[in-house]
Image (spheres, rainbow, N blue to C red):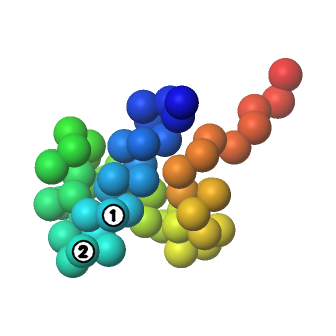
Amino acid sequence: MQPARTVIRALVLRQMDRGSSTVQAGAALGFSAKAAWQIGKHYLKGGLERAIYDAPRPG
C-alpha cells in the first residue's frame, strides 16, 4: 500500500500529462499551483521516482 502523498503526487502528474495546467492539476487534487509546479519540476529533473517519492532525510 502506497502512502497517500505518493498517490496524490502521481495523480498530479497524470493530470498534467493529460494537458492540465499546474493550477488546474493542483486545484483538482487539493494542491496549490506551486506544489503542483514543484512536482512537475522534480519529474523533469529526476524522473518519476524523484517526483513522487520523498528523498531520504538525514538522521
27 left or right, relative to 49 = left
Residue that sits furthest to the front in the current view: 1
Rendered residue at 22%/58% (across/down): 25
> Is 10 or 23 nearer to us in this picture?
10
Q: Residues within 10 Å of mark 1 (few under 14, many from 20)?
A: few
- Please report contact status of discs 1 and 2: CB closer than 8 Å, yes or no: yes
Q: Is residue 46 visible?
A: yes
Question: Mark 2 falls on what kind of element?
Answer: loop
> Is 32 or 7 nearer to us in this picture?
7
Rendered residue at 60%/69% (across/down): 47
Q: Which mark is residue 18?
A: 2
Q: How many marks?
A: 2
Query: Three-letter amino acid code at disc 2?
Result: Arg
59 left or right, relative to 10 = right
Residue 2 higher or lower than 38, as above or below: above
Circle 1 is placed at which residue position?
14
10 left or right, relative to 14 = right
Q: Which mark is residue 6?
A: none
Question: Mark 1 falls on what kind of element?
Answer: helix
Residue 39 higher or lower than 43, as above or below: above
x, y percent for residue 54? 62, 41
Figure quadrant of residue 12: bottom left
Residue 53 higher or lower than 4, as above or below: below
Query: Three-letter amino acid code at disc 1?
Result: Arg
Q: Is residue 38 visible?
A: no
Rendered residue at 15%/49% (across/down): 27
x, y percent for residue 42? 54, 63
41 left or right, relative to 20 = right
Location of the N terminus by quadrant is: top right
Q: Residues within 10 Å of mark 2 (few under 14, many from 20)?
A: few
Rendered residue at 34%/53% (across/down): 11
